[in-house]
Image (spheres, helix red, strand yellow):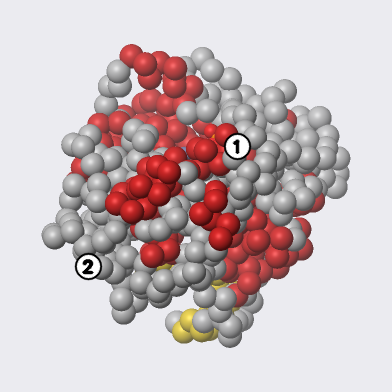
């Protein structure tokens, strides 16, 4: 896996975003003049071949046209970007309409989550891997996190991995704080995040207590920058992944907020959080999205980092509008969902990809909580917010993309970017996280009787979820996956247990 950016062409391309406005089933829409001019022959052929939808035993009548027909508005400008976009639509339409699905679909044209195969795929990803995986050596902790979180989401018990995990991870911790990607590698925030989440998922004091919290706290002090952000490793790049991961570590491990004396920028007033939300604010771009650092290109993964980091620092409805232009961000996020594919792209003029079901999809519960305001609890009673914005994106579109286009159908199993790509554990994890998020509604709760909070950075522990139940639910109930925490992206409940464990220790 790489975090490097690919080249792309900057051209205007009119897309149909589907946020929140699914048309009723089988309602025909006028195809504007424009579209026939811009459409290639091959797409016309595909388009034709997709009618009629009803093939005996295979396809269903209840697939809205939105997901089986070409976008009504297309740009006349042909570029490399519009070409690969057309190819992606061609690639996805036969899966969305059921023509290329090997397994039976329900009456909404949606196949089951092939749980058994995906579970086997993730278990296998934790065994010995073939030689080419040497290139991913520095990402080993990520492989643990992707597999463990995915397995728990699908109902598997992962305690069998606890001992192996401890003996593998303990030696990659450095005495100066933090974890490297493997033996002898310098500490870096990305593997450190994956290590901490993995240990929290398997849980238990023996696992949690391998983390040297005091050294971790000192190391975070060394990564803190005077402009408010964090470097990923000492002397390395300062980006918004660092801001999010540092906040995750501080809150989950219940670390003190003050800077260690070793910090280059130590002062009596400065803390690990000084200027952090201000720095995040500087990462919002002219497009409305969020970039890896100030003055770069907006990408969905970074929007999630920004929203989740802010939601660790304070209640989402208070802090998000304070530091981000919410209407502009919503406009940019809405443009990430494409029709007919139903999935999300990571950035302007680029393609849908299953992993953005989490990076972009995971932004929506935080935005919804920001707009809804808190649910108020008084004793056992939880009252919903007075108003609710409801669904801000097409949950149906995302679920269709995931279940129709992202499941590897061969016996290999696992989930993928798009049909032309192989499954891998990264996509399996984040596609499932997106599916879970589309199937549940998250609430941010505050107490009617505000008590003195017991510790620091408590906002992340005030979330609860409800399954979304609909009269005409498009997926089968057995295909609902367990919930992921909306900020930490680990199974619901695990972060609360870890936080209490570290809180009970008092100091280090
Ligand atoms: C572009 O790749 C991808 C990025 C610019 C950022 C990816 C970052 C993450 C997925 C996670 C970051 C967060 C944490 C917490 C580690 P691409 O050009 O291959 O894909 P694209 O065409 O979809 O943009
Ligand atoms: K991608
Ligand atoms: Zn991807």
> Which one is in front in this view, the residue at disc 2 or the one at disc 1?
1
Asked if 394 appears above or below 156 in the picture, the reply is below
Q: Which residue is mark 2?
A: 107
Q: Residue at x 66, y 69 (%)?
A: 317
Q: Residue at x 31, y 49 (%)?
A: 94
Q: Which residue is mark 1?
A: 79
Residue 359 x, y percent position in the rendering: 52, 48
Q: Quadrant of the C terminus?
A: top right
User: Mark 2 falls on what kind of element?
Assistant: loop
Q: Residue at x 77, y 50 (%)?
A: 286
Q: Are marks 2 and 1 in contact (CB under 8 Å)?
A: no
Residue 440 x, y percent position in the rendering: 41, 66
| Residue 499 visible in the shown view | no
Residue 73 x, y percent position in the rendering: 56, 58
Asked if 283 appears above or below 337 in the picture, the reply is above
Q: Where on the picture, by quarter, is residue 28?
A: bottom left
């Amino acid at each position: 896996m790489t975090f490097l950016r690919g080249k792309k062409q900057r051209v205007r391309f009119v897309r149909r975003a589907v946020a929140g406005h699914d048309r009723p089933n089988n309602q025909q829409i006028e195809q504007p003049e424009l579209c026939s001019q811009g459409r290639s022959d091959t797409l016309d052929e595909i388009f034709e071949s997709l009618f009629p939808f009803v093939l005996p035993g295979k396809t269903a009548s209840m697939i809205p046209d939105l997901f089986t027909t070409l976008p009504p508005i297309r740009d006349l400008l042909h570029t490399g970007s519009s070409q690969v976009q057309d190819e992606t639509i061609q690639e996805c339409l036969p899966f969305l309409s059921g023509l290329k699905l090997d397994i039976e679909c329900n009456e909404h044209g949606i196949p089951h989550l092939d749980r058994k195969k995906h579970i086997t795929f993730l278990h296998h990803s934790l065994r010995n891997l073939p030689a080419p995986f040497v290139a991913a050596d520095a990402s080993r902790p990520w492989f643990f996190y992707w597999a463990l979180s995915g397995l728990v989401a699908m109902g598997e018990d992962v305690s069998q991995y606890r001992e192996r995990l401890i003996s593998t991870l303990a030696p990659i911790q450095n005495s100066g704080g933090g974890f490297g990607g493997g033996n002898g590698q310098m500490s870096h925030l990305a593997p450190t995040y994956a290590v901490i989440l993995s240990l929290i998922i398997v849980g238990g004091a023996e696992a949690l207590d391998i983390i040297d919290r005091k050294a971790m706290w000192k190391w975070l002090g060394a990564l803190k920058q005077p402009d408010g952000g964090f470097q990923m490793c000492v002397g390395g790049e300062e980006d918004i992944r660092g801001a999010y991961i540092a906040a995750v570590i501080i809150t989950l491990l219940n670390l003190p907020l003050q800077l260690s004396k070793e910090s280059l920028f130590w002062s009596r007033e400065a803390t690990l959080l000084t200027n952090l939300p201000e720095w995040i604010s500087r990462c919002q771009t002219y497009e409305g999205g969020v970039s890896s650092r100030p003055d770069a290109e907006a990408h969905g993964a970074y929007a999630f980092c920004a929203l989740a980091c802010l939601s660790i620092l304070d209640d989402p409805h208070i802090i998000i509008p304070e530091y981000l232009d919410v209407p502009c961000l919503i406009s940019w996020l809405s443009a990430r969902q494409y029709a007919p594919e139903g999935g999300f792209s990571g950035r302007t003029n680029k393609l849908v990809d299953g992993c953005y079901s989490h990076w972009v999809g995971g932004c929506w519960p935080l935005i919804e909580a920001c707009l809804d305001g808190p649910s108020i609890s008084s004793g056992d009673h939880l009252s919903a917010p007075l108003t609710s914005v409801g669904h801000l994106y097409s949950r149906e579109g995302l679920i269709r993309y995931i279940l129709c286009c992202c499941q590897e159908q061969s016996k290999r199993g696992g989930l993928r970017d798009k049909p032309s790509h192989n499954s891998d554990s990264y996509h399996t994890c984040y596609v499932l996280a997106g599916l879970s998020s589309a199937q549940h509604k998250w609430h941010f709760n505050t107490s009617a009787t505000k008590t003195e909070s017991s510790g620091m950075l408590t906002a992340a522990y005030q979330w609860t979820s409800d399954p979304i139940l609909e009269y005409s639910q498009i997926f089968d109930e057995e295909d609902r996956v367990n919930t992921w925490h909306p900020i930490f992206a680990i199974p619901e409940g695990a972060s609360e247990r870890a936080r209490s464990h570290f809180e009970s220790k008092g100091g280090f």
